[in-house]
Amino acid sequence: MKAKVNMAGKFCLFVLVMYKTQATESNTLYKLAERKSGCVKADSSESCPISWKLSAIAAKFYHQQTRQVSRALTALKSFNASDECKAAFNTTMCGQGAPRCLADGSQDYGDAAATCAKIYSKCPQQNSDFLKSQKLCDNIISGKIETPKCVKPSYIEGNCPQPKYKMPDHALSLYKRFSADNETIESLAQVNASSQCKSEVQKMQCVAVYCSEDEKHLLTEFTKAECLNTTKMCVIDEIEKLIKAVPYLEPQLRPTIEKFQDLCDVYPDGSIKLPVGPTGSGNIPLVHRFVLLLSFIVGKLFA
């Protein structure tokens, strides 16, 4: 009976993959948000409170990012981190996830570089050494950056597939960050996920955000329901079985489930589809990079 259920699940995933292939071949993707909608208001989170507006894409990722920060702080507390350490980490990471959106479309990250340096000096050595190995502060975005542009991505290192179309450069920074995150790969390996599951879940967790043909909208390849259904079938259900069998592992495994679900929440409901822009030509211009491996950091802190 179990074999039949697994076979049925694999068949459903195969159907989903074939459907998505046909959908993207028509060069229309799902609308996530208006790209040039100016600064938008987001409901403030207790973990990373804000009194200012955010860019459209920062607003979409804001709550997912703040939940990641909250889980990381919980992990730091387990290492008896000082208040100065936790404050520096919180200020730095919240600032990266919620930069001030200015009237001219630029974004202000403040003096994040100076704040990040305090993480190295104030946090427990075990945490500090790990964050240094990830070059956390080397890749911090600090100061004011110009209005994001739609650019052709150059080669992306890491776990995410190469982008198919032009991306807003600030979305590209997030994509690089997700590509450097090894936690998804590690989680899929732990539950012996099939190669098809590994491919689809990793792609969904990378959250590729593209520019529409007219560069007025932000688009994605998947919907929230598709992401939740696939990750549940491929990995979350298996992790829940492991937790049930070995309850003491729940504190280490529950953040992984929450991370998968958080990223799925970023996707749209799929009610609107629009033409996606071409890949264009030429090299991507130098942009400020945000490759802070927050998801990876959370996983390692809880390990």
Image: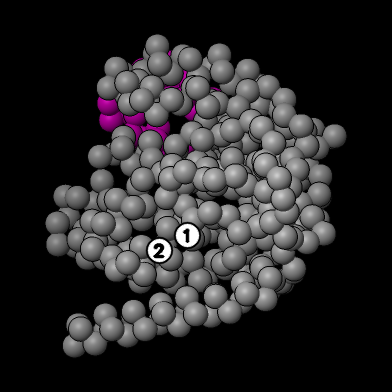
Whether residue 24 is visible: yes
Amino acid type, residue under disc 2 in the picture? Ser
Camera-side residue: 94 or 170? 170
Above or below for 80 versus 177: above
Write the start and end of the magenta stretch as one range.
69-91
Residue at position x 58%, y 79% in the image: 22
Q: At which x and y percent is residue 262?
A: 48, 54
Residue matched to label 2: 199
Whether residue 51 is visible: no
Q: At which x and y percent is residue 269?
A: 62, 69
Camera-side residue: 3 or 21? 21
Residue 78 magenta-drawn? yes
Residue at position x 40%, y 11% in the image: 121
Name the image quarter holding the N terminus.
bottom left
Quarter of the view holding residue 33 = bottom right
Residue at position x 67%, y 76% in the image: 26
Q: At which x and y percent is residue 87?
A: 47, 21
Residue at position x 71%, y 45% in the image: 282
Circle 1 residues within 10 Å: few <14, some 14–19, many ≥20:
many
Residue 203's tag is: 1
Q: At which x and y percent is residue 283?
A: 67, 42
How far apart marks 1 and 2 lie (CA) works out to: 6 Å
Circle 2 residues within 10 Å: few <14, some 14–19, many ≥20:
some
Visual colour scheme: one colour
Contact check, label 1 and label 2, Cβ < 8 Å: yes
Camera-side residue: 162 or 56? 162
Quarter of the view holding residue 135 = top left
Image-based side of 82 in relation to 69, left or right? left
